[in-house]
Image (tube, helix red, strand yellow):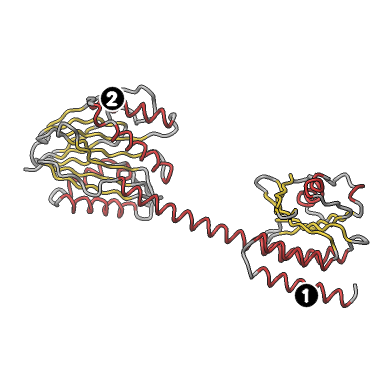
Amino acid sequence: MSLGTEVLRLRALVEAGRLVHQSLDVDRLLDNILAAATSTVGAARGTVYVCDDDKRELWSRVTAGPERLEIRLPYGKGLAGFTAEKGEVLKVDDVRQSPLFDPEVDRRTGFRTVNALCVPIRDRQGSVASVIQLLNKEGGFTADDVEFLTLMGDQVAQAIENARTQQLLLASQKMARELELARRIQTLLLPARLPKVPGVQAAARMVTSREVGGDYYDVIPMPDGRHLFVVADVSGKGVAAALVMSNLQAALLATTALGLDLPAWVTHLNNVLYDRLTGSRYATVVFLLMDQDASSARLVNAGHPPVLLRLADGSLKRLDSTGPPLGMLPGSSFEETTFDLPPGSTLLLYSDGLNEAAGPSGVELEIDGVERLLVEQAALGLEAAADAMLAAVAAHSAGGPEPDDRTLMLLRRSS
């Protein structure tokens, strides 16, 4: 190789390195780098195939007239596919004599391939990340061309890595924006403030373990003047659970005027949720329907942790599950518990993010622990008691596994 040719190739490598840091548009980068490679080597055309290990195929976008054609090749197929699979340089002086040559690309692009050089490009881990392919050099490709393309390949690998890093960053930023929007929407689905219920004080809190969660609470005024208090927990976490939660809320609000008694209403909601989810997701829900004067209430507990009732004399009662979770089994039936609510009584409705909160040693708070918190905060106002309970749960689980969504609703019958 002459000194002039060596200088020309060195300039091309320096220019390729400069281009890599100029733009994150991978198509434009590869076009410019390949233009430098093909002109320096004296080839008629060049292509960079990017490896997709998950699909075990190569892809590239090549120019054909005013358009870009996307080409996809399985590993092992064609000249570039062979190089990607074997990780070996492939130099073919007459492609018509090679069983590896696939004329389909020529038919699609209108180009006629005579000879070819394929060089594997490895990433920092040593895996084949892409393949540079040059076509049609007069007199055929040489060992010097292989060495030059290998050096040029370092710039190609850097360009692809930069582009992928930028794409991951942009995707992460987009997801963060979408999750923030989902969080805002979910917040709007919850009551901005709890409605005033005659004879009852109420406070509610929800802390999601991620940007959005599957817990839900609400207070729904009924046509006959009663109020329905709801706390729900959808299986799983994150966006999927939040979508199921919104379905549950929509079904609940859409059926308030049906005039069904509470067990029949919950049965209807169960069937609606099962039809939409086909049993793949479910929700544990507690429904507490309070009479107009707040002296008594009706409860259906669909697979939820027990509602805790603390009477004015300090005695505690657990109101356990009266049926399975919603959406798990079609045609499920639910029983109703009726109980009195004397003045000074306090009710705690909560999700299992409280009782299953575990510390570093794995010890969960359990129902007994939640009962202790209810007793400890009995002298506080409801708003302060709700904050204190969540703070105590957070302190118990500090350093433990990832927390679940945590929701609680405190109700106190006025004296």
Can you tell which of label 1 and label 2 is closer to the viewer? 1
Q: Position of residue 300 (x, y in %)?
A: 25, 30
Residue with the most extreme front position: 66
Q: Is residue 85 above or below residue 270?
A: below
Residue on which disc 2 sits: 334
Q: Is residue 183 above or below residue 9?
A: above
- For the image, the number of numbered tags is 2
Is 90 positioned to the left or the right of 64 in the image? right
Q: Please report the residue visible at 82 percent of the width from the left and 74 percent of the height from the top.
A: 8
Label 2: few (<14), some or many (≥20) within 10 Å?
Answer: many
Q: Is residue 182 above or below residue 274?
A: below
Q: Please report the residue visible at 33 percent of the width from the left and 33 percent of the height from the top.
A: 251
Q: Is residue 170 above or below residue 270?
A: below
Q: Position of residue 249 (x, y in %)?
A: 32, 38
Residue 402: which numbered mark, if any?
none
Is 210 positioned to the left or the right of 39 in the image? left
**SS assignment at label 2:** loop
- Disc 2 residue type (three-letter): Phe
Q: Please report the residue visible at 63 percent of the width from the left and 67 percent of the height from the top.
A: 23
202 or 380, which lies in front?
202
Q: Position of residue 52 (x, y in %)?
A: 67, 50
> Which image quadrant is residue 353 in?
top left
Label 1: few (<14), some or many (≥20) within 10 Å?
Answer: some
- Disc 1 residue type (three-letter): Arg
Q: Quadrant of the N terminus?
A: bottom right
**SS assignment at label 1:** helix
Residue on which disc 1 sits: 11
Is 362 positioned to the left or the right of 373 in the image? right
Earlier-in-chain disc, 1 versus 2: 1
156 or 364, which lies in front?
156
> Which image quadrant is residue 10 in?
bottom right
Q: Quadrant of the C terminus?
A: top left
